[in-house]
Amino acid sequence: MPNSNSSHSRRLRAETAAVHNKRIAAEGGSRFSVLLNADETAALATIQARTGESKAAVVKRLILEERNGF
């Protein structure tokens, strides 16, 4: 069932997301933006097509794999 689009529901989802983001930041997390060239974008799209992951999930997984030596 899709999310309700009432103003109340949108506000509650925004508040929940803000609390979640603040908690991650308080635990030392960070947010960043990256601009990819065409080749890098194509490589990311290929990975996404193969794994079914979002862009953010691909980046997170690759970071963790690198950290863990995979």
Image: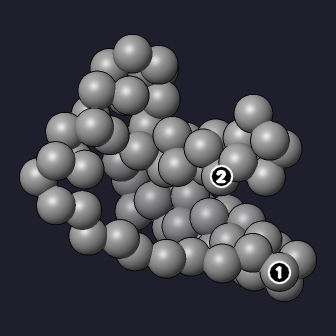
Residue 32 lies left or right of residue 64; in this view the side is: left
Q: Earlier in the sequence, mark 1 or mark 2?
A: 1
> How far apart are the alpha carbons under marks 1 and 2?
16 Å
Residue to which mark 2 is pinned: 63
Residue 69 percent location from the top left of the image: 80, 41
Which image quadrant for residue 31? bottom right
Mark 2, secondary structure of its residue: helix
Quarter occupied by the C terminus = top right
Mark 2: few/some/many CA within 10 Å (<14, 14-19, 20+)? few
Crowd around label 1: few <14 · some 14–19 · many ≥20 (10 Å) = few
Instruction: Determine the secondary structure under disc 1.
Output: loop
Residue 26 in view, yes or no:
yes
Task: Please state which amino acid type lies under the numbered disc 2.
Answer: Ile
Instruction: Compare residues 19 and 31 and report the one nearer the observer.
Output: 31
In the foreground, 69 or 25: 69
Identify the residue position indicated by label 1 in the image.
28
Residue sitting farthest toward the left: 38
- Residue 52, percent from left and from top: 43, 20
Q: Exactly how many numbered labels are in the figure? A: 2
At horizontal 11% and vertical 52% (from top left) the residue drawn is 38
Front-lying residue, 16 or 40: 40
